[in-house]
Image (cartoon, rainbow, N blue to C red):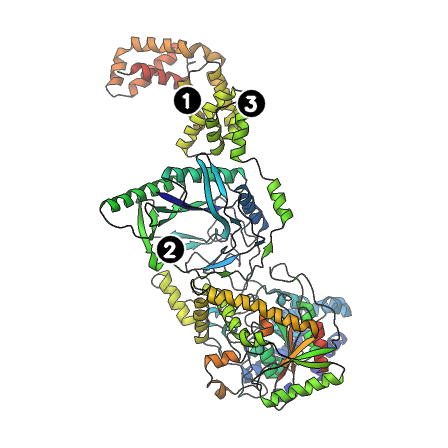
Amino acid sequence: MRIGLEVHCGLDTESKLFCACSARPSPEERPNSRCCPVCLGHPGSRPLTNSRAVSHALRVALALGCRIPAELRFARKSYFYPDLPKNFQITQYDHPLGGGGTMETSFGSVALRRIHLEEDPGAIVDRGSYVLVDYNRSGCPLLEIVTEPALKNAEEARAFVDELSVLLGCLGVYSPERNILKVDANISLSDVRVEIKNILGQRELQRALEYEEARQRETIARGEAIVQETRHWDAALGATKPMRSKESEEDYGYIEEPDLVPHPLEKGWLAEVRKALPELPLSRSRRLVKQYRIAEDDSRIICFSGLADAFETIAGSVDPVLAARWTRREVLRVLNLRGERVISLELLRQIASLLALVEKKKVTDAIAKELLEKLFEKPFDVKTRVGAGLSVVMGDELRAVCERVVKENQKAVSDYQSGRPEALDFLLGQVMRATKGRADPGAARLLLKELGKA
Amino acid sequence: MPARKKATSKQGASAELPALQGRILQGEITLSDHVHEAVDSLRELDREYAMMTAISEELARSQAKALDAEKRKLGKDILRARPLLGLCVSFKDAICVRGVQSAAGSKALKGYTPVFDATVVSRLREAGCIVLGKTAQDEFGFGSFSVNVGKDFRIPRNPLDRERCCGGSSGGAAALAAAALFPHVAIAESTGGSIAAPAAFCGVHGLCPTYGLVSRNGLIDYANSLDKIGPIARSLDDVSRVLDVIAGFDAADATSLQRTMAPEAMPKSIALVKQEGVAEEVASAMWDAVKRMESSGVSYKEVSLPYTAKFALAAYYIIATSEASTNLARYCGLRYGFQPPVEGSAEEHFTVTRGEAFGAEAKRRILLGTYARMAGYRSAYYERALAVRSRIIAEYQGVLKRFGALVSPAMPLFPPRFDELSQLTPLQHYAMDHLLVGPNLAGLPHLSIPLQARLPAGLLLIGNHLQEKTLIRLGRMA
């Protein structure tokens, strides 16, 4: 199986690609409130290229080792759709901003075909019997990154997009909170290529590809042929649906965008952009192995998952090998569980104090894991909670208290075993009483569960 | 017809801007009075020749009032701030004037009032010009005779003979320039010859500047890589003074040139472009003009531009319609302009809207342009036409290295009568542009000067890029 991806991601610029309207949504904005004659396609309006969007795109192209053309050129891609104000999209065709290139990932190098800049259409708002159009997003800068069909399975495809979004964040051109990320995927089990459009986000990508792989395998198993076509991912339904066949592929009738003259991409500018590139995940991973003497495997995953900053902060006060293991396993696990990628500085400080306690064996791994999850829910001061006053009821001492409570309350234990979870609250209450409220309830609950098992 | 008589007299004292400005500064007339008279006169002309698509009386009056107040405050100094004080200007319908219907002569935009002024409009207003209204044109500029007007629009008539066409596509502009009884300059637009052709047919001066010299910001597009805005006026003085105001870099248009016009030069020699199919009377009038220039010390030589003669027309129509077919896609009855009741799907609504909104020639050019850029035909037509265009530019540059300017008739014939035009096939219509598409494709400035003949005809002067001043100087000698 071979999978190729077209990733469309919003670029984090202040203004839109071809006009001065804000590219950043505000929390309670009204529909069609961030628009002007240019992004509404009024007759006589002219596009002007946002050079910040171009330098953002160049950062990506250079970081991915793409060939940069001598000139920046745009093209018109024509199709009729209500969310497209001019009924053509200004994009790039013959002369993409980046040709070729390679993306380094935690699972190896992935060959790229091209990357290019284009404008986002507006958004269709479905109202059942009719639709409305909101042009606030119209004209926002999008970067399209196209891979070769080089990915082997759905999991790799997801990891690729995960790590790409980390890279884009690290380059400072993309913000998961503010910018969209959409994927079109093509998948071929044999030599017939099926394209899946309209996949929003990494989790959906994996689901869509897994579904499509299964569908195609079943089709082949039934002895039927796979049809070359474009399908649409219906997230609610959890299935891909046929959109159009090869014969009815749209013809976009590309022409050069005549309102934007080719703009030279001067060598001096490129050199400046290249010089300002931050340390990229692959070289950072190598550096971390050397500097902190951590496992190469841990380092790669930390760097490609965007946790390198977190790791280096923690490793400032904790044994780096322990910090690496915990960052790679536990911190990443909790982030994945929560679908998050960002850790606040305060939270990092608390994680570091927690791991310092682990290092000094003041809390067990099991308790630390549970505390870590709680920290992400609502940060608290780890030292106060686990600190001085509580040291009495940590570890073996807490275990002893719990064992005693379990022994003295056999009825509650058997209630718990027979499926009445509220009995555990009673036991916990007893532990808190016995320790004068100085036990950590999370850790105690965990121990009680363990001891109360039938 | 009083208008006709005036229109043919070239030097009516009251029709000269400096005379008018003198009277205003002396306090003999206020701008409000002047505008009142001009609008009345314009309405009368429009009833006779149908050259307007909108008359912006309210705007003109409010401008006049404001300028009167400014004049009271500044006195004679007002001319320093407003060098074109009191000059009435009209704009081809495709040029956006804020709050005034700007429809490019198309039903698709009937009732559309732009939310901003085109750069040329704001520059002329800043210079003290009064905006009288919008002039008739072929729908979106699609024609050479101003007979392809949009549905529900009137065909403008030639002020020198009502039964003849004005030329196109800026027909209304040239007609008003010829007929106006007050100082007036028409701001027109040329894609493939739409300034020189009507100027020639209406017996006035028309200058199409170097591509990019005058900002296109606010121009309703026909073909963006070809569209140029320029003046049509009765006198070369008016052409020149308006050009000075509208030319120059505009940050709002990415194709606007940073460089400005070259200083006026006096060419020693010009090249006469050999042409086929020129009517005898037109050719002989042209020769008279060439001889006059020769007697003023400008030698001439005949040259041919074989590549341009053979391929310019085809390349022009492919590039122009390719771009036009994308530009017209936005008119779909969703956001502005003509909108029939919404029924069915978006596709159905678009189809009904566009079917009703566009005239036959607009539909023809959308089909032609869409075909030329389709996958499978793109390289054979669109891309090849772009390559041809580069070679045509090179051919002109080669000749213009040796000569100060090129000379030919602007149109190969006198303005046809409407009954004659209706006999022509679309291809014959397109072929009428063959003298003009070359310089338009090459983005070269060209000026049409009225020739002395039985009926109106124009002498075309083509210069190298940014040589507008030299063309005007040559034009004075023709």
Q: Could you tell me which residue is drawn at 64 percent across and 72 percent down?
A: B445
Residue that badge 1 annotates: A369
| Position of the N terminus of chain A by quadrant | top left
Residue that badge 3 annotates: A316
Whole-percent x and y of residue B472?
70, 76
Determine the residue located farthest toward the left in the rendered image: A222
Whole-percent x and y of residue B293?
72, 83
Tell me the amino acid under the disc marked 3. Gly
Q: Earlier in the sequence, mark 2 or mark 1?
A: 2
- Chain for mark 3? A
The disc at residue A131 is 2
Q: For the residues marked 1 and 3, what is the alpha-carbon distance in whole angstroms? A: 20 Å
Q: Secondary structure at mark 3?
A: loop
Tell me the amino acid under the disc marked 1. Lys
Q: Secondary structure at mark 1?
A: helix
Q: Secondary structure at mark 2?
A: strand
Q: For the residues marked 2 and 1, what is the alpha-carbon distance in whole angstroms? A: 48 Å
Q: Are marks 1 and 3 on the same chain?
A: yes
- Can residue B412 be seen from the camera position used here? yes
